[in-house]
Image (cartoon, rainbow, N blue to C red):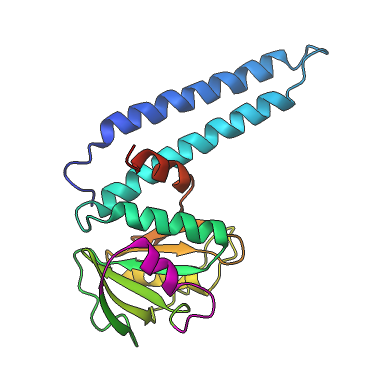
């Protein structure tokens, strides 16, 4: 569930307004297609950017709502995911919420360290012995690394996903934990929650907005 302070109504209205704007632009393109002097290519670029902004805003808002009640270090997580995505360093980060994870995560190496993005990034640096497993975050602490998660065998329609993503979905099917994933093949970031995988677009925009001026 969302944090009680996360009122989704204003966000929904903002998203509706932006989507109506996109719909208007699409309709304008349709209306002008009969004009031989009209070229729609630049309009497609504008519409693509508008879609990107809508997706980024929605993803950032819901991610923050899902995590704000469970860690004060949301910005460290965001910066870490941004940096790992830019470098294409694969990562799997579990943020524990209400459900206990004992008996579901296996083979973790205890860390018990304060959560910070430089430390998280170092765990997932290629060649680090801990980088292949999942890091467990509880509140503002890195509890352990190199954890093994249950792997989902449910087919994801229209997507070919790797072991990290299947592990993220597997844990999200059994608990209310939120699991952040970075693909080492593409650098794409996503998160698994309640058994579903969601793209995490625009993490760079979220970091820029949240950084102190």
In the picture, measured across the screen, residue 97 lies left or right of residue 153, that is left
| Furthest residue toward right | 36
Can residue 27 be seen by looking at this rendering?
Answer: yes
Question: Quadrant of the rendered structure where residue 139 is?
Answer: bottom left
| Furthest residue toward front | 213
Question: Quadrant of the rendered structure where residue 41 is?
Answer: top right
Q: Is residue 196 magenta?
A: no
- How many discs mark residues in the rendered view? 0
| Furthest residue toward bottom | 107
Can residue 197 be seen by looking at this rendering?
Answer: no
Q: Residue at x 47, y 46 (%)?
A: 204
The one of 18 and 138 positioned closer to us in this rendering: 138
Identify whether 62 is placed above or below 187.
above
Identify whether 151 is placed above or below 90.
below
Q: Which residues are magenta?
A: 113-129
Identify whether 14 is placed above or below 33.
below
In the picture, measured across the screen, residue 97 lies left or right of residue 206, that is left
Give how far across and how far down residue 151 sits, in percent.
44, 77
| Furthest residue toward left | 4
Q: Residue at x 38, y 78 (%)?
A: 149
Give how far across and how far down residue 191 sits, in percent.
41, 58
Q: Residue at x 53, y 38 (%)?
A: 52
Identify whether 128 is placed above or below 171.
below
Give how far across and how far down residue 7 sits, in percent.
22, 36
Quadrant (top left/top right/bottom left/bottom right) for the C terminus: top left
Q: Residue at x 34, y 42 (%)?
A: 210
The one of 68 and 151 positioned closer to us in this rendering: 68
The one of 91 and 6 positioned closer to us in this rendering: 91
Give how far across and how far down residue 156 sits, in percent.
52, 63
């Amino acid at each position: 569930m969302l944090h009680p302070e996360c009122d989704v109504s204003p966000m929904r209205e903002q998203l509706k307004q932006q989507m109506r704007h996109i719909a208007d632009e699409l309709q304008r393109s349709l209306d002008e297609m009969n004009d031989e002097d009209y070229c729609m290519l630049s309009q497609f670029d504008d519409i693509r950017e508008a879609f990107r902004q809508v997706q980024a805003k929605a993803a950032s808002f819901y991610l923050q709502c899902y995590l704000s009640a469970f860690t004060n270090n949301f910005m460290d997580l965001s910066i870490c995911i941004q940096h790992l995505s830019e470098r294409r360093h694969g990562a799997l980060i579990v943020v524990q919420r209400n459900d206990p994870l004992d008996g579901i995560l296996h083979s973790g190496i205890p860390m018990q360290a304060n959560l910070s993005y430089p430390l998280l990034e170092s765990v997932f640096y290629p060649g680090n012995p801990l980088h292949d497993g999942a890091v467990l975050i509880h509140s503002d602490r890195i509890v352990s690394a190199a954890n093994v998660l249950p792997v989902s065998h449910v087919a994801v329609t229209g997507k070919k996903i790797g072991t990290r993503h299947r592990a993220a979905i597997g844990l999200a099917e059994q608990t209310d934990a939120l699991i952040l994933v970075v693909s080492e093949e593409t650098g794409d970031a996503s998160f698994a929650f309640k058994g579903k995988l969601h793209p995490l677009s625009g993490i760079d925009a979220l970091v820029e907005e949240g950084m102190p001026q």
